[in-house]
Amino acid sequence: MSGAALAVVVVVVFFLALCLLQRYGDLRKQQRMVLFGTLLSWYLCFLIVFILPLDVSTTIYKQCVHDNSNHPTPVTRARVSNEAEASSSFYPSVSVPKVCEKPWSYIPDGVLPVFWRVVYWTSQFLTWLLLPFMQSYARSGAFSRVGKIKTALIENAIYYGTYLLIFISLVIYVAAHPQWKFTWMELQTIGITAANTWGLFLLVLLLGYGLVEIPRSYWLSSSHGYLLAKTYFKAAKMATEKAAAEENLADVMEEVAAVHESVKYNHPLRKCVDTILTKCPTEYQEEMGRNLETSCEERNILPSKRGLVTLHKKVITAVQRHGQTQVQWSILLDQAFHLEDVAKSQSSPIRHFAHGFPSAQHHGWISRFIYTPTVEWYWECVFRQGFYKLLAVLLGLLSAAVVWSECTFFSTHPVLSLFAVFIQMAEKQYNYICIEMACFISILFLCVCVYSTVFQIRVFNYYHLVPHHQTDAYSLQFSGMLFCRLTPPLCLNFLGLIHMDSAISHQDRIQTSYTSIMGSMRLLSFISDGFYIYYPMLVLLLCFATFYNLGSRCLNLLGFHQYITDDDLTSDLVDEGKELIRRERRKRQKVEDGGNRSWAWRERYGVQGTRAGYTELKDNQNSPLTDIKKSVVKFTRRDRETEEQQTGLLQDNSSDESSPNRSRTTGGRYLSLSASRTDFFDDV
């Protein structure tokens, strides 16, 4: 298995990152550079999470070999001197060391250091340079590549300047110290320390919120009443945001329409206007085209090139925000409808889950054979509540272990960190699988606590990972940048919790390959002995603040409405959201009923295809529908005229575009459709 485990994990993690990108992003429509940058950043971060447990188990094996090689003589002499009496007596005082068992995932020497250098420095290049530049480049309103690059550099000048200032300050500190020599390795260590310090600063803030909120959210989610009330609250807020986004988009489209009418096709800036039009929604493009054909007004006010650049950026932002609100609103409606269906199923005596809109459900083999309506009823109405409470208790215990370990991991004698105690117990038994699973689950839990906080806090609602290929490019890039920025310090913090970071634990142990590429943090003693040890204790205060909802109450006072059960404004928003959901349910029910009627019509009269309009009956004059029409409609003209009128009724309306007013007979019956009503079921 030498190196095979590493190769398997590398391949599996790549397909995992690709599947997640396919779920959240759109591989067909989004730009290739955005997809490549996001995929690479996710892939590298997942590699760190999956490979670090293998690095820990390999380091434990090397430590065992190192300890046995330093003390071989006394044990060997004892075994030789007592070899003759071994069959007749037993000597409990002689401790024979166990043979160091090689882990199944052992990675040969020299592989992991190179691997970690490539992964770490590539992820740092992505998060600090490439992805921020790509974000500014994608949102730039310039019309040329050079202009976009220039805008991206200007926007990131302050961003890069802040980190450069921190880096220069650390360089001056090291260069002024008389005991240190300024070398290339020390320069790398300063850069890594600066990045990890920034990441740890943000990491503890996010971790203090997630460690409390995630277990509490699962505990509260066991109550369908709480979930439904909170969904109503979110619906009221999202409706306001959706209306604001639509109004903003309409205002921007008015500016675009004005520019579209004022800049003629022979003007030098017409190419820029056409570029802006391609970023507008299709319905607005068609409306502008119709208005331009009917408008004869001359507008002499021409925009400047800089004004078009500003307008282009406003269009990109408005369209992006409008698309986000539409997708979030659709997902929120589905959640609200599902929760209302659960409430109805709980009060129903029939143990069969009934969906309010069956056509919106997925009818795959899983729903037909495994997750049947009966199984769904038992899950949603019986087992889900107990399972969520049990999961909340387990996550709460894990959160308590993290908080305790963050406050006590600096103590090595005695060992107070619970993660270090568990790893050391498994190390004595050489249970490498248990070590790797414990490390993986712990790192994964920390990652979930940190990353979910960013996408759940109201201030960061602009960035939203939406499944079903609905995540925009800016959110994808932000997620990749955030993962690359927080994953390395998070894993380094975890190694400190299990006492495998000698810069913090000050133990004479073999370091993992991951910590070896970080350099000696003792170069900056005020960070390794001060900030890295005492700053994580702040997570305890943040957990107390989150438990008592201090942050939510402060945001509520500042105007960012949060869901607080004992607040009057929250109750008003819940009632408003309930009425909005009821209104949307009526609209969707009308569409559902119309679809059912059209399906029944096609099934009854044997009409093939998805469009059951009059055009589908043109070639079948003897169909039952035609016979019914002939028997019901009575005409006052001759039989020849009657046949012509019936033929005109069943033909396409393309021949009636020139004379739409000639479609009404003396009897008052309409025999043809207008240009906007080509098919019978288009209104449905």
Image: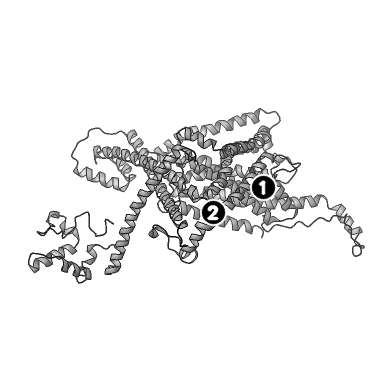
Whether 612 is drawn above or below 261: the answer is: below
Mark 1 residue element: helix
Mark 2 residue element: helix
Measured as percent of width and height from the top left, residue 285 is found at 28, 46
Q: Judge by depth and name the residue closer to the eye, 544 or 294.
A: 544
Measured as percent of width and height from the top left, residue 583 is found at 35, 48
Q: Quadrant of residue 256?
A: top left
Q: Type of residue at label 2?
A: Gln
Measured as percent of width and height from the top left, residue 192 is found at 61, 39
Measured as percent of width and height from the top left, residue 21 is found at 48, 52
Question: Which class describes the residues within 10 Å of circle 1: few (<14), some (14-19), or many (20+)?
Answer: many
Q: Nearer the viewer, mark 1 or mark 2?
A: 2
Question: Which class describes the residues within 10 Å of circle 2: few (<14), some (14-19), or many (20+)?
Answer: some
Residue designated by label 2 = 385
Q: Judge by depth and name the residue closer to the eye, 248 or 332.
A: 332
Residue designated by label 1 = 513
Q: Quadrant of residue 176?
A: top right
- Residue at image point 27% right, 67% down: 607
Could you tell which of marks 1 and 2 lies nearer the N-terminus? Answer: 2
Q: How many marks?
A: 2
Answer whether residue 182 is visible to the viewer in this image. no
Q: Quadrant of residue 313?
A: top left
Q: Type of residue at label 1?
A: Ser
The quadrant the C terminus occupies is bottom left
